[in-house]
Image: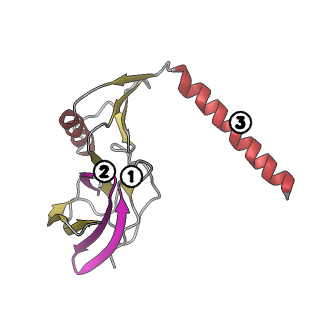
Amino acid sequence: MKVKFITAFGLAAIISVIYLFIAGTGDNRVVEEKDEETIKEMVAAYSTGSVDDETASITPTELIITDSDDQDVTYDLLGDDFFVSIAPYVDETHPCTYHNLTGCQGEMVEKEFDVYIENSEGDVMIDEALTSLTNGFIDLWLPRDDTYYITIEHDGKKVNSEFSTFEDDATCITTMQLL
């Protein structure tokens, strides 16, 4: 049993070193700065399919754009807001942690949901009808470093859940099943 642990640990270490070497070369990665509003506009453009020749993903700290030549341009998310995209579902979902703005597809496309969100202090952040995008997701920007309680309702079905916006949290939430 100990040999399997060492082998698995050793393999993970080797993979980490290879990743760091590749990421550290910087040959295909450029870091650029943009203000928070411009980044939000860029995210919206990718989420709505307004950009065709590039792909984009978003982590808690970076927006990563990859062009057709596999050149990455990374924008640091330095603002006070955290991006999270939620795909409510009834029957089908997919596992995801960091949202691929141009690739993730949710089940419920262009559907209207009643969304209620409050923060850990009980302050209401959102209480309105929101329509999912053509990718089936609802994109939100919420203050960082908090826990949120959410209720989503659609067509007589409902889900109550919670999520948070800390540095290691997911930007893609695909676990909210409407029952």
Q: Amino acid at mark 1?
A: Phe
Q: State whether residue 120 is above or below residue 139.
A: below
Q: State whether residue 91 is above or below residue 20.
A: below
Location of the C terminus (image quadrant): bottom left
Q: State whether residue 157 is above or below residue 34.
A: below
| Residue 148 coordinates in the image, percent (x, y) | 30, 64
Is residue 155 in the magenta section? Answer: yes
In the displayed structure image, the side of residue 10 where residue 149 appears, left or right: left
Q: Which residue, given by chain and number where applicable, does mark 2 sit on? A: 144
Q: Main secondary structure of the magenta part?
A: strand
Q: Residue furthest left?
A: 128
Location of the N terminus (image quadrant): bottom right
Q: State whether residue 8 is above or below residue 64.
A: below
Badge 1: residue crowd in 10 Å (few <14, some 14–19, many ≥20):
some
Q: Which residues are magenta?
A: 137-164
- Distance between mark 1 and mark 3 Cα atoms: 29 Å
| Residue 168 coordinates in the image, percent (x, y) | 45, 49
Q: Nearer the viewer, mark 1 or mark 3?
A: 1
Label 2, secondary structure: give it. Answer: loop
Label 1, secondary structure: give it. Answer: loop
In the displayed structure image, the side of residue 164 where residue 168 appears, left or right: right
In the displayed structure image, the side of residue 63 where residue 70 appears, left or right: right
Q: Amino acid at mark 2?
A: Arg
* Cβ atoms under marks 1 and 2 closer than 8 Å: yes
Q: Which residue, given by chain and number where applicable, does mark 3 sit on? A: 14
| Residue 111 coordinates in the image, percent (x, y) | 21, 64
| Residue 78 coordinates in the image, percent (x, y) | 30, 36
